[in-house]
Amino acid sequence: MTETKQDVLSETPLLSVKNLRKEFGGLVAVKDVSFEVMPGEFVGLIGPNGCGKSTTFNCISGLLEKTSGTVEVFGVDVSDKRPDQIQKLGMTRTFQHTRLWKDMTVIENLLVPPRKQFSPNPFLSLFRGRSRPAEKERLSKAFAVLDQLEVPHMAHNMAGELSGGQSKLVDIGRSMMGDPQLLLLDEPVAGVAGPLAMKIFNNLRELVDTTGISVLVIEHNMDFILRQGVDRIVVMNEGDVLMVGTPDEVRSNRAVIEAYLGAAGDDGGEEE
Ligand SMILES: Nc1ncnc2c1ncn2[C@@H]1O[C@H](COP(=O)(O)OP(=O)(O)OP(=O)(O)O)[C@@H](O)[C@H]1O
Ligand SMILES: [Mg+2]
């Protein structure tokens, strides 16, 4: 029998965040955040500036030590794990501020692991133990990733000469190099012009549908995320989760309308 989307979604979560809290001194950046990402899901994490979205990512990916709560990646409690150990489980992330190696080409950037997810010695881990066939395989993987993102023509461009939007795409490409099962993207379209932003989201949707990986993407524009075909949205506000639901459920939720959509929430959802 063919596996339906519902069957897939009933499996164990790839990511499970329970009662996550993060304090910086007296500031509570994340108060009580709980949500899950299931296999094959495309999920948005949305909230206004400073509500704790990136801090949530930083706690999930092991960059910050959480104050309390639990984070499980592929069913493994990652409390004591380093970022590179969490990445090895099959989860990669990007950062809000893209930092490519500007003096390298796009393809070369794809061959270097994402920053801050390095093992303790990044350059040794890059070259050690790689046979020539393995290097060749990695190179063809890099070209395949650029194909998937529909930017193979950029392979030999210098990263320093890319536009903001193109850099974001290359950054996503770099995070796909390790064949992750779960991709966490921090504002992949911030500062990117409308048409390219939509193209990036279309590509992500297609990536989820064709490969079955899961994507959790941070976005700050509610109007935008509601139209991008994500499966579910986690709505944050001031360090808490306001609600988790489908775009339709979010659009008609009273608390969300009051906090985000104002009067536009009553009629704004119908426009194309
Ligand atoms: N390393 C840190 N030290 C102290 N305070 C921090 C640190 N990182 C974040 N904060 C504070 O925690 C709160 C949440 O920040 P965070 O970056 O998680 O928000 P965000 O939702 O990602 O916002 P934005 O939409 O602007 O990216 C903010 O008040 C921020 O100033
Ligand atoms: Mg942020």
Image: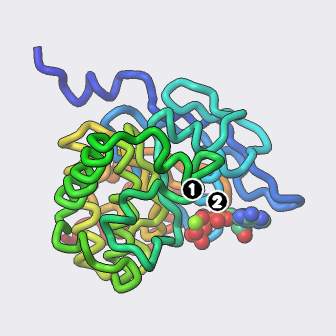
Q: Are marks 1 and 2 in contact (CB under 8 Å)?
A: yes
In the rendered image, residue 30, in percent from the top left (x then y), is placed at 70, 53
Crowd around label 1: few <14 · some 14–19 · many ≥20 (10 Å): many
Task: Locate the C terminus and report the quarter of the image it occupies.
Answer: bottom left
Question: What residue appears at the point 22 percent right and 71 percent down from the top-left corner?
Answer: 271
Q: Is residue 55 above or below residue 43?
A: below
Residue identifier under label 2: 52
Q: Mark 2 falls on what kind of element?
A: loop
Mark 2 C-beta closer than 8 Å to ligand 1: yes
Q: Answer with mark 1 or mark 2, whichever residue precedes in sequence.
A: 2
Residue identifier under label 1: 236
**Label of residue 190 in the image:** none
Question: What residue appears at the point 18 percent right and 66 percent down from the top-left corner?
Answer: 152
Question: What residue appears at the point 41 percent right and 47 percent down from the top-left corner?
Answer: 183
Mark 1 C-beta closer than 8 Å to ligand 1: yes
Q: Amino acid at mark 2?
A: Gly
Residue 57 visible at all: no
